[in-house]
Amino acid sequence: MNFKCITCSLGEIIPVLIACFSITACGQSESEDRIIPLPYEGDPGELAPALQEERTGMEFILVKPGEFMMGSGDGETGPPAERPRHRVTVSRPYYLGRYEVTLGQFQGFVDDTGYRTNAEDRGKASGWDGRRWGKKKGVNWKNPGFKQETDHPVVCVSLNDARAFCRWLGEGYRIPSESEWEYAARAGTDTAFYWGTDVEEVCRYANGGDQSAGRIFAGWNTAACDDGYAWTAPVGCYLPNRWGFHNMAGNAWEWCEDAWHGSFAGAPSDQGVWGEIGGGGRRVLKGGSWYFEPQDLHVAVRNSHRAYEATNGAGFRVLREIP
Ligand SMILES: [Ca+2]
Ligand SMILES: [Ca+2]
């Protein structure tokens, strides 16, 4: 395991996990052999609280069963798409990535397989270029329109691309359902933000539209604080939620498998995907992105794109099932 430290604008030195790649042939199914339990002194018969995927260095945190209230509450400003708030029971434990998938991890997948993303095949992706929003020719994960390091979240990846990355990791890896995602993001909280109700704390927990962005992008309604990054930031550069997940708010939108519905009316009360798995219509994205105004980085925020669409604000996080 390799670590490096970066200096955030917050003035802190924070260790950031760097991917370690030992490339194996495409299509090999070695996921069980590649899993390394992280140090754990508990009962050997218990599920380890965290695992590491050896080839990529990705860390996964155990999410235990429970119940939660999904969507925006009565006192919150969320739109109709985040309502009605409804109870969801999570009956099956799972592991979820501690961080968004990084540019370096996605590079390892492409190096191993020769995979071409939807944005590369289509010759374009959508996003903000510093002056306007829209589709941009030549924009893709290698060239999102701004500088990234290998420990930033990969962006300009479609849901199809994210699914392909999961297949490469092996059996049991997949994109989470929206309820699995929001349960982990809330981490036992029921407030608008997973750090509480104070929007002024946003720069401690999330990379959103802040003073760094406001100095570059004229007219942005930014947070009063400075998180140090106008575009994407290294994963893990901000405080985690109570269960240890980083960047569930901001940095990059994260794909979920659920088909898009304009409200939660009729939503499932379990952790299953709402709609068929693998569909190509509009699918859900969660968590907001680096360009978001602070109040919009609340935990219930949701958006949608078609499964082939890519933007420079969206990436993904991986779930690992427990057999
Ligand atoms: Ca920022
Ligand atoms: Ca995120």
Image (cartoon, rainbow, N blue to C red):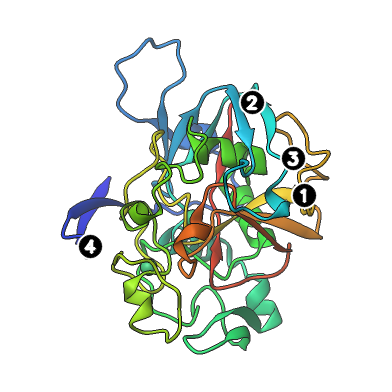
Q: Secondary structure at mark 2?
A: strand
Q: CA distance from mark 1 to mark 4?
A: 38 Å
Q: Earlier in the sequence, mark 3 or mark 1?
A: 1
Q: CA distance from mark 2 to mark 4?
A: 36 Å
Figure quadrant of the N terminus: top left
Look at 51% across and 41% down and name the residue there.
185
Tell me whether the residue at label 1 lies in contact with that at label 4, contact meaning CB atoms closer than 8 angstroms. Answer: no
Q: Is residue 9 above or below residue 298?
A: below
Q: Earlier in the sequence, mark 1 or mark 4?
A: 4
Q: CA distance from mark 3 to mark 2?
A: 12 Å
Amino acid type at circle 2 is Val
Q: CA distance from mark 4 to mark 3?
A: 37 Å
Of circles 1 and 2, the one toward us is 1
Mark 1 sits on what residue?
263
Look at 63% across and 46% down and name the residue there.
175
Tell me whether the residue at label 3 lies in contact with that at label 1, contact meaning CB atoms closer than 8 angstroms. Answer: no
Look at 58% across and 22% down and name the residue there.
66
Mark 1: C-beta under 8 Å from nearest atom of ligand 2: no
Q: Look at the image and tell me whether residue 18 can be seen.
A: no
Mark 2 sits on what residue?
90
Q: Earlier in the sequence, mark 1 or mark 2?
A: 2
Q: CA distance from mark 3 to mark 1?
A: 15 Å
Give residue 177's position: percent from left, percent from top.
67, 42
Tell me whether the residue at label 1 lies in contact with that at label 2, contact meaning CB atoms closer than 8 angstroms. Answer: no
Amino acid type at circle 4 is Cys
| 109 with respect to 90 (left or right) | left
Mark 4 sits on what residue?
8
